[in-house]
Amino acid sequence: MDKLDTVFSCPFCNHGTSVECRIDMKNLIGEASCRICQENFSTTVTALTEPIDIYSEWIDECERVNTVDDDGVPVEDDEVDVDYRAR
């Protein structure tokens, strides 16, 4: 079976192999950090978590905060005003 990557390209500065992922099983925290631009990301981990999982969550979170709806409003800031009162 092939080994999974442990170093990755930074989504901020785009340097290849500059992001390293560390897993702290004692505190159940995983961290991805770029040694070039110092950007980092933390998440909770389990016994099955691998470095690629931490990096993938970071990329997913970057995409989530950069997603906008058709009106140009960030999806996370877009609130739905619903009136649930009987008419």
Image (cartoon, helix red, strand yellow):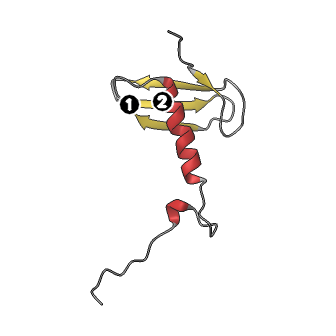
Left or right, residue 31 beside residue 48: right
The answer to whether 75 is drawn above or below residue 15 in the figure is below
Q: Residue at x 56, y 37 (%)?
A: 40
Q: Residue at x 47, y 37 (%)?
A: 42
The answer to whether 81 is drawn above or below residue 15 in the figure is below
Q: Amino acid at mark 2?
A: Asp
In the rendered view of the protein, which quadrant contains the C terminus? Answer: bottom left
Q: Residue at x 61, y 53 (%)?
A: 66
Along the polypeptide, which appears first: circle 2 or circle 1?
A: 1
Judging by the rendered image, the residue that carries numbered circle 1 is 45
Q: Residue furthest left?
A: 86
Q: Nearer the viewer, residue 16 or 69?
A: 69
Residue 29 in the image: state x and y as whole percent: 40, 31
Residue 65 in the image: state x and y as whole percent: 56, 53
What secondary structure is marked by label 1?
loop
Mark 2 and mark 1: Cα distance apart in space: 9 Å
Q: Residue furthest bottom?
A: 87
Label 1 packing within 10 angstroms: few (<14), some (14-19), many (20+): some
Asked whether disc 2 touches disc 1, contact meaning CB atoms under 8 Å apart, the reply is: yes
Q: Nearer the viewer, residue 19 or 81?
A: 81
Q: Amino acid at mark 1?
A: Val
The answer to whether 19 is drawn above or below residue 74 in the figure is above
Q: Nearer the viewer, residue 38 or 80?
A: 80
What secondary structure is marked by label 2?
helix
Residue 1 in the image: state x and y as whole percent: 49, 9
**Numbered circles on residues, count:** 2
Identify the disc placed on residue 53.
2
